[in-house]
Image: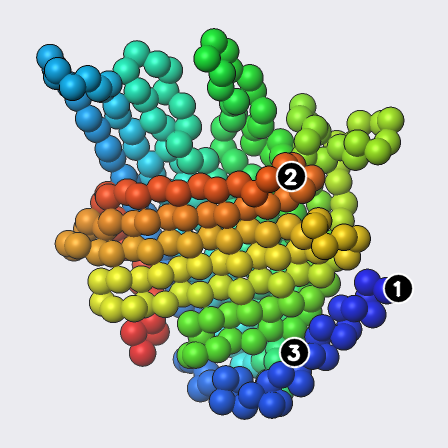
Amino acid sequence: MKKFQLVAVVLFAAVVFCHVNPVICEEEAPPPLGWDNELLAYLNLNQASFDNWSAGGENTMGWQTGLTGIFTNYAPRREWVNTLRLAYGMQKAGDQEAIKSIDEMRLGSVYNYIANYHVDPYVAFRFESQFAKGYAYSDSDKVEVSNFMDPGYFTESLGIGRTFLEKIIRSRMGLAFKQTVTDKFPIPYADDPETEKTEKVRNKVGLEWVTTVDWQISESLRYISLVDVFSDMKASNQIDVRWDNLLAAKVASFVTVALDFRLFYDRDISTRRQLNQALSIGFTYTLAESKYKDE
């Protein structure tokens, strides 16, 4: 009961915030009705070779490919936002076996009812997993530690949300239900170490806060960020945090340089925060472009 009381207090505070900050929470003109789609495909390549190079070095080759998309349906007093991120890549150094450099599958859907009262109610769904087997490597061996849907993450949530600065920033908070599904690898993803039984599914209920930023800084520079915070209200050090950042600069019609930085913390998996950073240059092609992003 205390969890639900805290959720109610947080949602009420968001409404009060918009009342005392009308400039930040001012109403925005609705876009035309119908679908507005944006889909981007990319391929990044890197390579280095050495032949009789006195300073030393090792031949390397790698690639990454993926799809990112936003599909939005506008209807009277309703907005349905669907997001897609698929990415996979391999890296090979010298005579060593090729290993994964990225493996990500993420689908999201948020349905908003435009209440025209500073904040709008929403329901949301998110799914996350990977395409192929993942390994932990040592000097002499490799051990499989993950696979497709092992783990798989599902999140359902409902609450209130708001867009700011002409939809550059979208923020929402509410009650969330999370499921972690595993098969061969319940440890450490789903198993509860405090029980004797090995659980393959973990369920959590708590409070979710998600904020996204999609800022077209200039014609050739774009910044995209996602902050995802979840707490089951049990302890302050058990708050799950995911922070994704992407800064992409288009240097030619089909060539983009991108800096990708991610921070992840989930105490159920590791007591230490996890970091991932990549700088890449590659080819991009816009399969569908938003009709409203420059307005």
Mark found first going from the N terminus, 2 or 3: 3
Amino acid type of the residue tagged 3 in the rendering: Ala
Amino acid type of the residue tagged 2 in the rendering: Thr
- Alpha-carbon span between mark 2 and mark 3: 31 Å
Q: Residues within 10 Å of mark 2 (few under 14, many from 20)?
A: few
Q: Residue at x 86, y 64 (%)?
A: 2
> For mark 3, what is the residue?
14
Q: Residue at x 29, y 29 (%)?
A: 62
Which mark, residue 1? 1
Mark found first going from the N terminus, 1 or 3: 1
Picture colour scheme = rainbow
Residue 53 left/right relative to 17: left
Amino acid type of the residue tagged 1 in the rendering: Met
Task: Judge whether 181 appears above or below 164 on screen.
Answer: above
Which mark, residue 145? none
Residue 196 left/right relative to 92: right
> For mark 2, what is the residue?
271
Residue 173: x and y, percent? 65, 67
- Alpha-carbon span between mark 1 and mark 2: 28 Å
Q: Residues within 10 Å of mark 3 (few under 14, many from 20)?
A: some
Residue 46 left/right relative to 269: left
Q: Is residue 188 visible?
A: yes
Q: Quadrant of residue 15?
A: bottom right
